[in-house]
Amino acid sequence: MRRLLWSLGFRAGSAGLAIALLACTAAGPAARPAVQQAEPYRVGITAALTGPLADNYAPVYEAINVYVQRLNDQGGINGHPVQLLVEDDSGDGTKANSNATKLIQQEQVSLLVVTSVSATYGPILSTARAANTPVFFASVCPREAFPPADPWVFCSGSYGALYDPAYAIQFIKEAARDAVSLGLVAQDIPLSRTAMDYAAQVAGEIGLPVVSRVTVPPTATDYTPFATQLQQAGANWVFAHTPWSTEIGVFDALQKLGWRGNYLLWAHQPAEEELTRRKSDALYALAGNALFAENLPIHQEIRAAVAKYKTTYPIEHMAEGWSAALALEQGLRNCGWPCGPRELRAAFNQLQVDMKGLRGGPLTFSSDNHYRTKVYFKVYRWDSQQNRIVTARDWAGLDVVPGL
């Protein structure tokens, strides 16, 4: 696992990392004297910056970090800088709980941002609820953010354990040229199993036969047995909704076996790089954020910010964190000043964020829906004739409804 070197500097110890973003280093302390002297918005972050799954979560933090540096360089929000206090939990629930306790009780943050694995969610939420502090998930959304939502839980993550498979299965039905024999790939973790259970349910409702379901242990390194099962069952379309290493690992194993079907996976951060590297017309990526291959104005904006403030991870990994940062800024602006936990919760309850083309529509919260009122998807694939990534299906939305 690569070591993450944060451009702004760090203080490392048993408690993790603490980074205060009061202004961009390029601007210097005297560049924005009014902002420097103003009391900051204090935002805590617990993140899997290290550990086996850091590559999935650290880029989200990096994007937020860059966004806030740029924001403070431009004068902050309502005349106040944004101060990020970040702690590394390594994806460990005990560490995450300690981080949440420190950030809420000692640092007295108004908001706790989480970009870490689902195993950390329970401890974090328990601590935050006891202190009446809002929690903002910037990666995978917990059940508590969906309607009817927990009053203190919000989420900008593009993933949705039930909405993703609902759209994916419908896309496969519409895109297939021949009769579909569907294979499903899950990892043996709760969110992935839930997604595949629902995928199987939706497939049955719309008349797509599921010929094989494989559940891959998180520790697997050889995906051949699972690919063999899918091939021998006669699957000609496969949908995978797992962490990246598993979903792409099963695809690669199928390719080595000479499988000639089509494969749809969730577009995690490495998807754009890996579609380009594999150059396979059979590989489709279901995305919640627009890929940088489109080079939209928002992508150019992110490129410019990353070039100035620097990140460890590639630019293609920044979209999820940038989406979260857009929502964070709007929430703080709506909150005004002073902005304590209760005021910030009220501001998020009425949040509407222009995603600037990074997603298919605005991110909108309501008092009982802290995920979004509509979730948008786009499907990409590699086109060997054009030698580039192309859009296989443009943005389409699903209404978010209570109880799903």
Image (tube, rainbow, N blue to C red):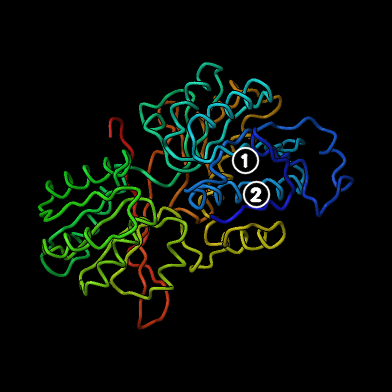
Q: Residue 219: x percent and y percent?
A: 35, 49
Circles 1, 2 touching at the beta carbon (< 8 Å): yes
Q: Is residue 386 above or below residue 225?
A: below
Q: Is residue 323 above or below residue 47?
A: below
- Residue closer to the observer: 124 or 75: 124
Count neighbours of disc 2 (C-alpha within 10 A) and say few if under 14, some if 14 to 19, many if 20 or more: many
Residue at x 21% of width, y 60% of height:
225
Residue at 56%, 17% (x, y): give it: 131
Tag 2: amino acid: Tyr
Left or right: 75, with 273 as reference point: right
**Depth order, front residue of 140/94:** 94
Crowd band around label 1 with a 10 angstrom C-alpha radius: few (<14), some (14–19), many (20+): some
Residue shown at 65%/49% (left/top)? 67
Residue underneath mark 1: 329
As helix, strand or loop, the secondary structure at mark 2 comes to: helix
Which label belongs to residue 52? none
Q: Position of residue 54 (x, y in %)?
A: 52, 49
Q: Is residue 220 left or right of residue 345?
A: left
Kind of residue sitting beneath label 1: Glu
Residue for badge 2: 67
Q: Secondary structure at mark 1?
A: helix
Task: Name the image quarter holding the C terminus.
Answer: top left
Examine the rendering and report whether any part of residue 208 can be seen.
no
Measuring from the top left, give residue 330's x and y in whole percent: 60, 39
The outermost residue toward the bottom is 385
Give how far apart the Cα atoms at labels 1 and 2 are: 9 Å
Q: Position of residue 164 (x, y in %)?
A: 31, 48
Task: Pick the residue in front: 88 or 151.
Answer: 88
